[in-house]
């Protein structure tokens, strides 16, 4: 899977998130390791989510993981804390803000 394919699929999943109630500015960079390697960012600004295929230098947190882990996180099939504690996800930056990602992802039970 290429970076473009990974980004396109993750963006589609992320754009289903309801961030309308979030008034705080949040900016996350995602670094995809391995297959589909690359970086993109997701930003919540005034209750609107933006997902773009660029690095974001004024970010609150950086998430680094494989494309497979990212798909599971974005789809709500993998808990953020579990992924972090089992080494599937590396998080740098403001951990309190990073945890807000969990509330935006779709819950697939």
Image (cartoon, rainbow, N blue to C red):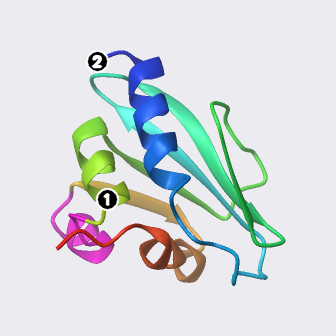
Q: Which mark is residue 58?
A: none
Which residue does the numbered mark 1 point to in the structure image? 73
Describe residue 9's horizontal placement relative to residue 58 as left or right: left
Q: Vertically, is 31 above or below 91?
A: above
Query: Can you say which quadrant of the picture contains the C terminus?
Result: bottom left
- Position of 98 with respect to 2 (left or right) is right
Looking at this view, name the residue that lies furthest to the top.
2
Question: Is mark 2 in CB contact (under 8 Å) with mark 1?
Answer: no
Most distant residue in the right direction: 46
Vertical placement of residue 22 versus 101, above or below: below
Provide the residue designation for mark 2: 1
> In the image, what residue occupies the spot 75% across and 45% down?
57
- Compared across the picture, whether 83 is left or right of 51 comes to left
Quick one: SS at disc 1? helix
Answer few, some or many: residues within 10 Å of disc 1's Cα (few below 14, many 20 plus, some between 14 and 19): many
| Residue at 78%, 72% in the rendered image | 25
Q: What separation in Å lies between label 2 and label 1 (alpha carbons)?
A: 18 Å
Question: In this orientation, which residue lies closer to the viewer: 31 or 53?
Answer: 53
The part of the chain drawn in magenta is: 77-87
In the rendering, at what x and y percent does residue 104 appear? 50, 72
Looking at the picture, how far across and down is residue 31, in whole percent?
47, 39
Identified at 42% across, 74% down, the residue is 102
Residue 91 location, x and y as percent? 43, 61
Quarter occupied by residue 90: bottom left
The location of residue 37, given as percent across then percent down, is 39, 24
Left or right, 12 with respect to 52, comes to: left
Residue 38, placed above or below residue 12: above
């Amino acid at each position: 899977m290429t970076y473009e394919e990974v980004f396109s699929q993750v963006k589609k999943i992320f754009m289903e998130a309801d961030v309308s109630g979030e008034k705080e500015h949040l900016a996350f960079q995602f670094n995809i390791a391995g297959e589909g390697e690359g970086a993109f960012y997701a930003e919540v600004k005034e209750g609107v989510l933006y997902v773009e295929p660029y690095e974001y230098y004024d970010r609150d947190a950086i998430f680094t993981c494989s494309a497979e882990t990212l798909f599971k996180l974005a789809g709500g099939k993998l808990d953020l804390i579990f992924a972090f504690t089992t080494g599937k996800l590396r998080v740098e930056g403001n951990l309190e803000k990073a945890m807000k990602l969990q509330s935006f992802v779709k819950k697939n039970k």
